[in-house]
Amino acid sequence: MNEVIILVLIGLLTGVMSGLFGIGGGIIVIPALVLVFGMTQHQAQGTSTAFMLLPVGLLAFLNYYKAGHINIKYAAIIAVAFFVGAFFGSKLAINISEVNLKRIFAIVMILVSVKLFFSK
């Protein structure tokens, strides 16, 4: 159950960030799956691709799937939460000035980059 709650939170955060900044899989989901769930980089990228299957890349999904690098359960949970989160993120974004939105985006990118750089 705890696992599902964390996956829903990842999906919601990713959806909000997508709606707010137009980012998601590469910036939020992949690091979260590696750092929180201990997935390999391949598994995280495959699972991220799976939850964005139709809009991003059916062919990339198939390659990751054939190689055994996709967790279907995680991808499905994140996809549903991502859908909801994107709605709320976009609602937030339209009420933030362009300058502040750029600054928030930059801070998020720096924080994620520093965390990934110093993790094993």
Image: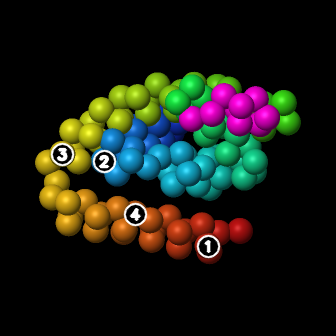
Q: Can you tell which of label 3 and label 1 is closer to the viewer?
A: 3
Front in this rendered view, residue 51 or 77: 51
Q: Can you tell which of label 2 and label 1 is closer to the viewer?
A: 2
Give the label on residue 94, or none: 3
Residue 46 appears at what percent x and percent y? Answer: 70, 39
Q: Can you tell which of label 2 and label 4 is closer to the viewer?
A: 2
Amino acid type, callout 2: Leu
Q: Secondary structure at mark 1?
A: helix
Q: Secondary structure at mark 3?
A: loop
Q: Which residue is mark 2?
A: 20
Q: Which residue is mark 4?
A: 108
Amino acid type, callout 3: Ile
Mark 1 or mark 2, which is nearer the start of the sequence? 2
Q: Identify the residue at image location x=28%, y=68%.
A: 103
Start and end of the magenta stretch?
A: 56-64
Q: Identify the residue at image location x=60%, y=67%.
A: 116
Q: Which residue is mark 1?
A: 117
Q: Is residue 19 visible?
A: yes
Mark 1 or mark 4, which is nearer the start of the sequence? 4
- 20 vs 117, left or right, is left
